[in-house]
């Protein structure tokens, strides 16, 4: 069983760019878990589950799922395994941001992940992920120094070598 198409499509776009494994400067899965902005964006997504038995806030579950997909997970089983490996301290921080003083219980089950992902509004999920990924790309562009000159093996810049100087 695959991940909800909206999350898969939105996150696949991010994964087509250099992934966390390709670039030590960037770790999108960890950024997704630590960044309160993504949690706030997902807080606007309606919860499609029935009103009874909601132990895990929809925004928290969506952040966990998005981070897992950014980490390369492609099935509910893989996502559930990834979520179970999230450090408790990080999970506690995420739940406190998303649910106030609520004590965290067990990790969301594979069934809970499935119910949240299939019950969430695909357009709202796509908008939240898209806006967050755009903000991540803009931040990365601001922090990446623009290289105007590239040193050559002889220690001169390419610009100087081409200009004869």
Image: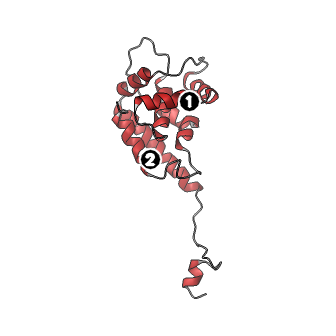
Q: In the image, which disc is placed on residue 85?
A: 1
Against 155, is 71 above or below?
Answer: above
Toward which corner of the image does residue 86 lie, by quadrant? top right
Type of colouring: secondary structure
Q: Which mark is residue 71?
A: none
Determine the residue located farthest toward the bottom in the rendered image.
164
Give the SS element for disc 1: loop
Q: Nearer the viewer, mark 2 or mark 1?
A: 1
Callout 2 crowding tier (Cα within 10 Å): few <14, some 14–19, many ≥20: some
- Of all residues, the one furthest to the top in this rendering is 52
Q: Quadrant of the C terminus?
A: bottom right
- Dot 1: few (<14), some (14–19), or many (≥20) neighbours within 10 Å? few
The image quarter containing residue 37 is: top right
Between 86 and 119, the one lying in front of the other is: 86
Q: CA distance from mark 2 to mark 1?
A: 21 Å
**Residue 90 placement (x, y as % from top left):** 61, 30
Residue 118 lies, in percent from the top left, at 35, 26
Q: Earlier in the sequence, mark 2 or mark 1?
A: 2
Where is residue 49 shown, x and y percent of the image?
A: 39, 19
Task: Point out the image quarter for the N terminus.
Answer: top left
> Could you tell me which secondary element the residue under label 2 belongs to?
helix
Task: Give the vertical position of 150 relative to 25 (above or below).
Answer: below
Q: Is residue 28 left or right of residue 129?
A: right
Q: Is residue 62 visible?
A: no
Pick the front one: 142 or 20: 20
Q: Which mark is residue 15?
A: 2
Image side of residue 103 versus residue 76, left or right: right
């Amino acid at each position: 069983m695959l991940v909800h198409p909206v999350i898969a499509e939105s996150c696949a776009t991010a994964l087509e760019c250099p992934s966390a494994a390709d670039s030590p400067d960037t770790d999108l899965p960890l950024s997704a878990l630590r960044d309160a902005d993504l949690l706030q964006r997902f807080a606007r997504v309606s919860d499609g589950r029935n009103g009874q038995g909601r132990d895990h806030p929809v925004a928290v579950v969506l952040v966990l799922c998005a981070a897992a997909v950014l980490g390369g997970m492609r099935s509910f089983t893989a996502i559930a395994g990834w979520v179970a490996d999230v450090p408790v301290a990080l999970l506690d921080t995420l739940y406190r941001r998303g649910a106030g003083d609520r004590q965290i219980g067990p990790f969301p089950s594979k069934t809970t992940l499935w119910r949240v992902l299939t019950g969430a509004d695909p357009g709202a999920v796509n908008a939240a992920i898209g806006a967050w990924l755009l903000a991540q790309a803009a931040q990365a562009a601001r922090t990446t120094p623009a290289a105007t000159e590239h040193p050559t093996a002889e220690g001169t810049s390419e610009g100087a070598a081409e200009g004869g100087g």
